[in-house]
Structure formats: C-alpha cells, structure tokens
Image (cartoon, grey):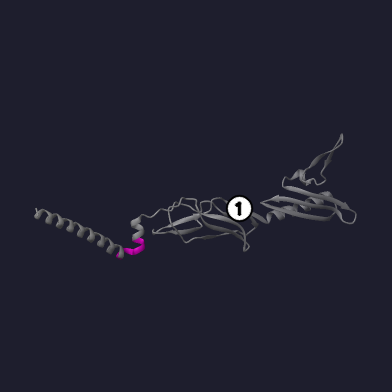
C-alpha cells in the first residue's frame, strides 16, 4: 500500500507489482491507499498521508483522468496536513509553578523533566496545568518529583507529566526552625531565659566555691 513497487514470490516464480497510486513514488509524505475506476464513478483514489504530526485521509471520486485524480487527491492531502501543527506542550527547565520552602522566606521553581509536544489544529495550542504542594521542606535535590502537571487540549487532559524541583531545597538548621516556629519575640525571651539560667548557674558555682574556701 505504501510502496511504489513490491516483489511477490510464489513458489519458484517472482513477480513485480507496481503500485497504481503513482503519488506514492512521487511524494514521500503520501502513504497510500487504493486506486479504482468504473464507468459510472470515473477514476477513484482513497489517499493517505502523514505530516506535521498528523495522519490524514482523502477520497476522490468521479474524476475524468488519472492526472485529475492525482491532482485532486494531492490538493486534499496537502490541505488536510496544513490544518495541523506540532506545538510544544511543556519545555524542560521552564518554570511552571513555585513552591514555598518551609522555614525560609523563599520559593523554589518547579518544572518538567522532558520536552513534550502535541499535534493540534492550526491556531490552537495545548496548555499545561500544574498541581503541586504549596510548601516543601528540605533537604531535597533538584529534579525530585513534587507534583503532577496535566497537558490539556480542548478542555481534556491528554497527558500527565511529573512536576519536579528545578533547584535544591535547603535544609533548615535547628536555630532557624526554632526562630521560624516561635517568632522573634518568643525566641528572644527563650534566649534571654537560657542566658539568665546560665548566669545564675555560674553565680551559684562561684558562691559554692567561695563558701568552700572560707570554711578551710
């Protein structure tokens, strides 16, 4: 169907069959399918082709000659292919969402690990809708999956992609966790209390040593 000629083997005999659809040999994007002719229907051709990521089929009936049949089929196939475009749905490394970092006043960009393209009608484009957790807690390496991104075309989800971190998520130190949990006022009071307790312990130790020295 998609070859200009084929060799058929039957026992010890070989036969070469030429495809009556001469568009196959002349145009690489044409892939088939079947020719025909009757007195009432004239010259017929069911054609098929591939291009711009799409597969199209044409049907021509009632043409007066093979040349007219081929010209009409080619025009239909080219028109069909021209109605489609290959468009990027997702680009690796591009920021599609951001997530906050727990204990830090910063965000980490989120992306997809691979490029994804989609065949769509001319003038239309797919969309990418991310769904990720609002906050992350480190440590996390760049490239770790933290959510899902949906490729949407004509209001339908056609593919789901992993949503990953585009940068490292830092781990918070113990003092930072304490500060971010309690806030500045409570953290200051706690530090003052610790310092006061330490000073009191030092004073008591000095008093004990003084009493011990005086009793000798």
Residue ranking furthest to the top:
12
Q: Which SS does the magenta portion mostly show?
A: helix
What element does badge 1 sit on?
strand
Percent across and percent down for residue 95 are 50, 55
Q: Is residue 89 above or below residue 11?
A: below
Q: Which residues are magenta?
A: 179-185
**Residue drawn where x is 77% and y is 48% of the image:** 32
153 relative to 168 in the view: left or right: right
Q: Position of residue 180 (x, y in %)?
A: 36, 61
Q: Is 125 placed above or below 15 here? A: below
Residue position for label 1: 117
Q: Where is residue 116 drawn, in percent x and y? A: 59, 52
In x, y percent, where is residue 38?
89, 53
Toward the bottom, the furthest residue is 185
Going 87% across and 52% down the picture, which residue do you hit? 37
Magenta run includes residue 181: yes
| Image quadrant where residue 80 sits | bottom right
Q: Is residue 63 left or right of residue 172?
A: right
Q: Would you say 50 lies left or right of 69 here?
A: left
Q: Which of the pair 147/29 is nearer the observer?
A: 147
**Residue sitting nearer the eye, 155 or 19:** 155
Residue at left 71%, top 50%? 50
């Amino acid at each position: 169907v998609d070859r200009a000629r084929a060799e058929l083997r039957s026992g010890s005999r070989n036969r070469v069959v030429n495809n009556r659809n001469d568009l196959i040999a002349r145009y690489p994007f044409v892939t088939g399918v079947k020719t025909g002719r009757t007195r009432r229907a004239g010259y017929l051709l069911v054609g098929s082709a591939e291009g711009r990521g799409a597969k199209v089929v044409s049907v021509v009936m009632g043409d007066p000659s093979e040349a007219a049949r081929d010209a009409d089929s080619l025009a239909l196939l080219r028109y069909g292919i021209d109605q489609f475009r290959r468009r990027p749905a997702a680009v690796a490394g591009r920021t599609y969402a951001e997530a906050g970092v727990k204990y830090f006043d910063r965000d980490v960009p989120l992306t997809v690990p691979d490029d994804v393209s989609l065949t769509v009608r001319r003038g239309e484009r797919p969309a990418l809708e991310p769904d990720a957790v609002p906050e992350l807690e480190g440590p996390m390496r760049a490239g770790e999956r933290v959510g899902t991104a949906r490729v949407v075309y004509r209001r339908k989800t056609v593919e789901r992609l992993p949503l990953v971190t585009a940068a490292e998520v830092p781990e918070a130190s113990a003092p930072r966790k304490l500060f971010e949990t309690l806030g500045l006022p409570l953290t200051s009071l706690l530090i003052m209390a610790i310092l006061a307790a330490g000073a009191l312990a030092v004073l008591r130790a000095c008093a004990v040593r003084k009493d011990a020295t005086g009793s000798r």
